[in-house]
Amino acid sequence: MRIVFIGTVEFSRQALEKLFSIGAEIVGVCTLSESGFNSDHVDLAPLCKKKGIPCYNALDINSLEVLKWISSKTPDILFCFGWSRMLKTALLQLAPLGVIGFHPAALPMNRGRHPLIWALVLGLDKTASTFFFMDEGADTGDILSQREVCIDPFEDAASLYAKVTKTALVQIEEFLPQLSAGSFVRSKQTGGQANTWRKRSYADGRIDWRMTAHSIYNLVRGLTRPYPGAHIVVDGQEIKVWKTAVVKDDGQNIEPGKIIAYSGMNPVVKCGQDAICLLSTEPSFQPIVGSYL
């Protein structure tokens, strides 16, 4: 089964390496040498060069030039794992078996943008790793393989990314021979259960001390590395907040945003409910107890 692979993030790299390791016939790869919006961007060209696989820097994945290049590889199927641009009909219909996409959520729930971030920010206790047949919609195609992934209370973006990736690599090893043999099963998504998450904005990452401490904790762990980070602004300077801890507090008459104590070298800030300890910031700073953020 001849495969053209499309991807440009860390998950793409690990999935492509997995495919190489299990003997998949990769006949071409489309990637991006640079990306202005993928925090976990990876250029797959060096890996392709190492493996002797043709690689194309696809600035416009739907362009006629890219379509011709992919078509010249006579693929049976396309794998699109880690690509933030929509594929148009001509590309979706180019290979006989279509295009397999990947979405780290329990489709049909939680379609759309930034699924790992929103799952953590919203405090979900589970998500999923889903491979599906791509169509003209956003994450709406028939499901090929789906596995539930539990989200632990201490999970952050990096650990959840790794956990979902580990699950997905197992799925790839399972469904690749099914695709080759034609023994796979397509399961239609039920639209009644569907919702779509929007694109995260810069403003979504700004901490509002009127939020509960637990909500701020979720925001920070959802946006921590490899993502851009939650932030506060102090005296006109943006400060990234990478890690926090909830501090239970029964103070009912302290305003949100007030520095109420230190835990070691780390400031503790009053929130709308309870308080938050700033364990890791960039740059680090040490506000005075009694001052306000």
Image (tube, rainbow, N blue to C red):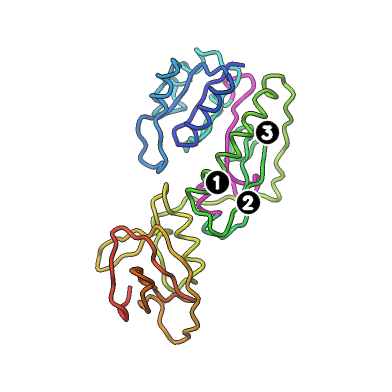
Judging by the rendered image, the residue that carries numbered circle 1 is 112
Q: Which mark is residue 215?
A: none
Count of marks, rendered view = 3
Contact (Cβ within 8 Å) of mark 1 with mark 2: no
Between the residue at mark 1 and the residue at mark 3, the CA separation in whole angstroms equals 18 Å
In the rendered image, residue 257, in percent from the top left (x then y), is placed at 38, 75
Of 31 and 11, nearer the camera is: 11
Tell me where the magenta segment starts and ends, as one range. 93-119
Dividing the picture into quadrants, the one containing residue 229 is bottom left
Q: Secondary structure at mark 3?
A: strand
Q: Which mark is residue 144?
A: 3
Q: Secondary structure at mark 1?
A: strand
Residue at 64%, 25% in the rendered image: 176
Q: Is residue 220 above or below residue 14?
A: below
Between the residue at mark 2 and the residue at mark 3, the CA separation in whole angstroms equals 20 Å
Residue at 64%, 36% in the rendered image: 141
Left or right: 191 with respect to 12?
A: right
Of 17 and 8, nearer the camera is: 17
Are there few (<14), some (14-19), or many (20+) residues within 10 Å of tag 2?
some
Left or right: 284 with respect to 180?
A: left
Residue at 43%, 21% in the rendered image: 48
Q: Please tell me whether mark 1 or mark 2 is closer to you in this view.
A: 2
In the rendered image, residue 249, in percent from the top left (x then y), is placed at 48, 79
Dividing the picture into quadrants, the one containing residue 25 is top right
Judging by the rendered image, the residue that carries numbered circle 2 is 150
Q: Is residue 266 above or below residue 86?
A: below
Q: Is residue 235 above or below residue 115?
A: below
Whichever of callouts 1 and 2 sits on the residue coming sooner in the sequence is: 1
